[in-house]
Image (cartoon, coloured by chain):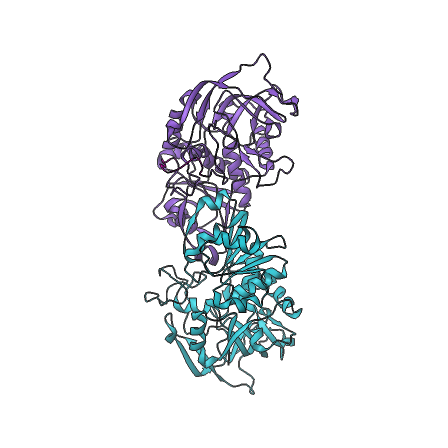
Chain colours: A purple, B cyan
Amino acid sequence: MNELPETMPKTMKAMVLEGHGDMDKLVWHEDWPVPVPQGAEVLIKVLACGLNNTDVNTRSGWYSKSVVAATTGAAYDKVSEDDPAWGGSPVSFPRIQGADVAGIVVACGSDANSTLLGKRVIADTWLRDWDSPLNKNNVGYFGSECDGGFAEYTTVDYRNVAAVVSDLSDAELATFSCSYSTAEGMLNRAQVSSDDTVLVTGASGGVGSALIQLAKRRGAKVVAMASEAKHDGVSKLSPDAILSRNPANLKAALKAAIGRETVSVVADIVGGDYFSTIIDVLARGGRYTCSGAIAGPMVSLDLRTLYLRDLTFTGSTVIPPKVFTDLVSYIEKGEIRPLVAATYSLKNLHAAQQAFIDKKHTGNIVVLP
Amino acid sequence: MNELPETMPKTMKAMVLEGHGDMDKLVWHEDWPVPVPQGAEVLIKVLACGLNNTDVNTRSGWYSKSVVAATTGAAYDKVSEDDPAWGGSPVSFPRIQGADVAGIVVACGSDANSTLLGKRVIADTWLRDWDSPLNKNNVGYFGSECDGGFAEYTTVDYRNVAAVVSDLSDAELATFSCSYSTAEGMLNRAQVSSDDTVLVTGASGGVGSALIQLAKRRGAKVVAMASEAKHDGVSKLSPDAILSRNPANLKAALKAAIGRETVSVVADIVGGDYFSTIIDVLARGGRYTCSGAIAGPMVSLDLRTLYLRDLTFTGSTVIPPKVFTDLVSYIEKGEIRPLVAATYSLKNLHAAQQAFIDKKHTGNIVVLP
């Protein structure tokens, strides 16, 4: 497609990231050009877009090791536009972020599947080389290596898009792709089954609440960790036990909650100073899986614990396409349900992201154009 | 068997560990009782016994986390007899250490396989529950949870023993079981294949030299790291490249040696301050496997590297029985060859172990009763 259909507006409202830094780098525009879908791309009218840590991490430069990183969302004065993002290459600016899109396909590039026109869709956040979709070395992330959903319109390859038949609202649909794919990818990497007891850190957040549901879906026993203020919210997801965020004696807390001091799996998105404590409750042969470190990425590891107890640690970032198609089937079968903590207008993304960073919510925060 | 055959001596020479501590806790005895094989046990006349880090670690109390451990072999004043050994339980004293036995079966308990009588054997170092041999939670280690080979005679379950048909000397045969099983277990855990490039740390030691040979046996490319003084010895094992122990710029050293800055696997027994450097050369999807930490177990880990690069870390300690039987087949087929650095008389174990700790050798050190 060389230009948009005449019926389409040529400009749109968009929140544009103009460089690494604090919230003021996210700048509101009301006359940003609507992207024209090329080749295999479809144009999506964005109905809702969920917030995720990766938006904050990319903005702040947290992924760059040239910056000594503390916790997610902190301001890093030293980060430059040359510093790498999550995948090792710099982000180019200006950039529209926003990975978790729900929307309607309103136009198609010449090579896109036009049966998607008019369908309500969500998008796989992984930009793949579709000639080699399992190649993890040639991928991008929606809203990082290309523009995403913090705008009225966005484009993505039609093979990244799936129509979803569901009664869920747009905001609810916009909570799944990033956080639930991340969570399912972690559980796949840790080979979680009904034999397992899974300790979930950061259980009140998007990935945390997804981990609870997706681990329960597999029949595993789930112990959720969250601050006391969020226990009511987390309990709606029916974990087998809920512990406080950082119990002073985790072994004793587990013993009281589930009858033994150890678990077979830790699914962690928190990291930080508590890392060594959660590693220490893994039974022989236990698995630690990680897709984030909102309390700080630099941790202290005792290699004796790793090797003498035959532990396995798996990092999880780039996820095969099957995770997304599995996720769509779980949504359509009603096996997982969203937990929308709050919605904001896109124009109020600063406030939405501040609420997200403050972590007083349980579940997902979504912006609506 | 209630008592030894009349033809057997009732006492023997043995080096007995009398508690955790420095070398002086290893005390020479010339009238220690020869053990009587019970039930499924066989009595082995020890012909040679190899030295391994686990002997030193158990003696010094290095496995106990109540001690802030530095490097293997350091003296730990605070370790007590109640402190746990490798498996989480205390060692009972007096204890005869020595895991890597080559010897002749000279007597059998009433339930042991008597066809082993007179055979030259080596022993699987893992004491198993033979009703459930894959159960990793109910195991002991030869020379730790029972007496081992630093004596003229020792006993072990006949199912731990394999006759080996080989032209190798007794000393050579006594180098395989502990270190080669450890190495093969690591390579299994990291699923090393001919597609891999494996970086081996501590390549001049027993496990390191085993890792080189066993990874080459799988068809993998091997980059060995060892101090310059040992490069001649290590080169006899035919790694594809040899680097210095801690290159200041490991990526550049790899690029010069193998044409690229990354590897797919790191097999590590060193740990210590260089840990973060070796993790940083793992390509996306790379695997780190560990069975020791002679440069110190406390390491700094950047969780961003683990998760953003989809890494897998595996600790390897308790090994399934198949590793030992595989190893025996490799020996009999001549697919691996020993590297005996020096032999000492058992009575001179202090000197042998000091040489072992000083790490000026390449390969294995063996004591002969």
Q: Is residue A200 left or right of residue B263?
A: left
Q: Is residue A308 left or right of residue B113?
A: left
The kind of secondary structure the magenta stretch mainly shows is loop
Residue A77 among magenta residues:
yes
Residue A364 among magenta residues:
no
User: Visible in this render: residue B42?
Assistant: no
- Direction top: furthest residue: A7
User: Visible in this render: residue A156?
Assistant: yes
The image position of residue B292, as x and y in percent, is 47, 61
How many numbered marks, from 0 up? Answer: 0
**Image quarter in which the N terminus of chain B is found:** bottom right
> What's the magenta region?
A73-83
- Direction bottom: furthest residue: B7
Picture quadrant where residue B238 is located: bottom right
- Direction left: furthest residue: B78
Whether A295 is drawn above or below B47: the answer is above
The image position of residue A51, as x and y in percent, is 45, 29
Front residue of B65/B352: it is B352
The image position of residue B344, as x and y in percent, is 49, 79
The image position of residue A82, as x and y in percent, is 45, 37
Whether B328 is drawn above or below A265: the answer is below
Picture quadrant where residue B19 is located: bottom left
Front residue of B281/B75: it is B281
Whether B175 is drawn above or below B45: the answer is above
User: Residue shown at 40%/48% (left/top)?
Assistant: A299
- Direction front: furthest residue: B256
